[in-house]
């Protein structure tokens, strides 16, 4: 049913594609992964030094 809905409604496909791209850019780019890794390292180092 969901696939048929996407086949029948190209505007919905475009909207969902754009939303997916936005989510990717917010959470999954290389820069975001590096930022998250730095936060984890900082948190770990602070706990070990406490």
Image (cartoon, rainbow, N blue to C red):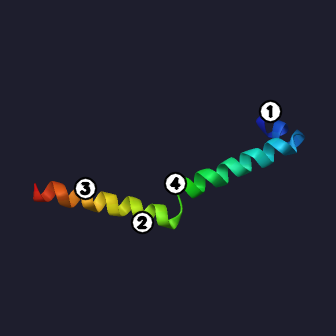
User: Label for residue 1?
Assistant: 1
From what the image shows, is residue 5 above or below residue 14? above
Q: Secondary structure at mark 4?
A: helix
Q: Decide which of 7, 21 is in the foreground and name it.
A: 21
Which residue is farthest left?
50
Q: Pick the quarter of the image with the C terminus.
A: bottom left
> Residue drawn 84% across and 44% down?
11
The mark nearer the N terminus, 1 or 4, is: 1
- 8 on left or right of 12: right
How many numbered badges does the structure rendering display?
4
Residue that carries the numbered disc 3 in the rendered image: 43
> Residue drawn 53% across and 58% down?
28
Residue that carries the numbered disc 2 in the rendered image: 34
**Separation of residues labelled 3 and 1 (CA atoms):** 45 Å
Which residue is farthest top?
1
The mark nearer the N terminus, 4 or 2, is: 4
**Separation of residues labelled 1 and 4 (CA atoms):** 29 Å
């Amino acid at each position: 049913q969901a696939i048929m809905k996407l086949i029948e409604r190209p505007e919905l496909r475009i909207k969902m594609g754009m939303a997916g791209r936005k989510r990717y850019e917010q959470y999954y780019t290389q820069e975001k992964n590096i930022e998250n890794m730095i936060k984890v390292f900082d948190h770990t180092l602070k706990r070990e030094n406490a």
